[in-house]
Amino acid sequence: MDIDFDLSNLDKAFPADFTPDQRAKAQTLFLKRLSLAAHEFYGGKMQVIPKCGFYGFNWFNVWYTPGVSAVSTSIRDKNDLSFSLSNRGNLVGIVSDSTRVLGDGDCTPPGGLCVMEGKAMLMKYLGGVDAVALCMDSRGKDGKHDPDKIIDFVKMLQPSVGAVNLEDISQPNCFKVLDELRESCDIPVWHDDAQGTACITLAGLLNALKLAGKKLSDARIVLLGAGASNTTIARLILADGGDPEKLVLFDSKGSLHSGRKDIESDPAFYRKWELCKKTNPQHYGSEAEALKGADVLIALSTPGPDTVKREWVHSMAPKSIVFACANPVPEIWPYAAKEEGAFIVATGRGDFPNQVNNSVCFPGILKGALTVRAKKITDAMAIKCAHSIADFAEKRGISPDNITATMSETEVYAQEAADVAMQAIADGVARVSMSWDEVYAKAKADIATSRAMFDSLQEEGFIAKPSSAMLNEAFKWAVEQVKK
């Protein structure tokens, strides 16, 4: 069976006798095989093109020397003009040392480029934001990864960009890098693995709790995994009204609590120690014990499908909510969690309902921050973004299999941008003041222009179309691998 170019018929194309596990495995293998072929076909995903007009060679005298001297000296005398006289005002630097790339660990700096280019592509298409991939080597002379090298790199970079998106930096370095740069830089520094995941997870959780008839302040919540994502999720849940006495986190050594001397003694894990002191006063000893009667499980840990046990889900409270977000394989398959009584199940994958997808968050929040030239992204801005996404979805209608906005809903990004911009103004971190309607209109127009440009480049043949044979070869190969 031929695969449609939009991949909408992918699930139906698999053999009818494939089990859910086999379908999921085949889809993952297919996407990886196709990704390799497509990246080789295009030579990567991004290119650089001018956005100004060119009406003859004398215009080089305007865009470059001697005319541009007036621009340089104007910015020299007032640095903030760089946001309006250069592309800095709409440009994000995506910075990574590639030490924790998706679920593949340390891929070396060049190995992370394809992921950072993908991030740049999503920013441009979804949020109308320009971005550049910047993978750097954070190793010191001893061969160990030094967070101070990332910090120095970003500080040196900031005059050229309007914001920095940190990506795929391993813990505990990621905590120090984000916290120091948030305070020392005069542009927003955002860690999407942590803050972006926290935003979209909180958005989905808010609507899931509404559907379950529960309140965030009353919910018993268990978080499996205590890396950058889950520790930030926990922090935002608590900041938004969650009860610390009803929240428990687990890392690879057990639950976090005030008796974890191994965490207390390591200053690099200060974020985890903060949560140890605030949460889990019961000192739960095991996941099974903590999940008995729990309302919510948020898992961002070891890929499954058996990391989360069926009996754990079965023991949870009525109308339980399970976020199993490990990639590429969730900690428990959604069908298995549902069979054990889960009311709502979310994953990090787009081939199941309720994808917890950072891409619904970061283009909008960065667009809002850039539009009002914010100096930082506060926790209040992140929480506002989560509520903006949740409110958007609730207004158009939510259900147990549709709890949050998706990438295809264009207007959510403009709404996020406007809501976040208003919060930035209220928090006193915006350089310029605009109305909600002004930010919304600008974001919506920029997104429309960006998408129209993509469409035009494809229609005119400047972006070539790969062959159907590429898709079908990858699909047949994946099916054969699963059948073996």
Image: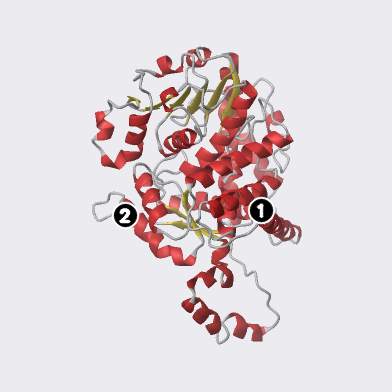
410 vs 99, left or right, is right
- Point out which mark residue 86 bears: none
Circle 1: residue type: Trp
User: At numbered mark 2, what does the secondary structure look like: helix, strand or loop?
Assistant: helix
469 vs 347, left or right, is right
Give coordinates of residue 140: x percent, y percent.
27, 55
**To which quarter of the image does residue 158 belong?**
bottom left
Give coordinates of residue 365: x percent, y percent.
57, 49
- Earlier sequence position, callout 2 versus callout 1: 2
What residue is pinned by disc 2? 148
The answer for how far apart the CA atoms under marks 2 and 1 are is 38 Å
Q: How is the image coloured?
A: secondary structure
Q: Residues within 10 Å of mark 2 (few under 14, many from 20)?
A: some
What residue is pinned by disc 1? 436
| Residue situated in front as seen by the camera: 295 or 333 | 295
Q: What residue do we see at 60% from left, 49% from top?
A: 364
Dot in front, 2 or 1: 1
The reply to whether the C-beta atoms of the residues labelled 2 and 1 are less than 8 Å apart is no
One can see residue 103 in this view: yes
Extreme-right residue of the structure = 459
| Residue situated in front as seen by the camera: 206 or 37 | 206
Q: What residue do we see at 43% from left, 63% from top?
A: 157
Q: What residue do we see at 63% from left, 36% from top?
A: 390
Give coordinates of residue 296: x percent, y percent.
52, 23
Circle 2: residue type: Asp
Q: Quadrant of the N terminus?
A: top right
Q: Quadrant of the C terminus?
A: top right
Q: Is residue 27 above or below residue 61?
A: above
User: At numbered mark 1, what does the secondary structure look like: helix, strand or loop?
Assistant: helix
Q: Is residue 65 above or below residue 152?
A: below
37 vs 379, left or right, is right
Q: Is residue 300 above or below residue 438?
A: above
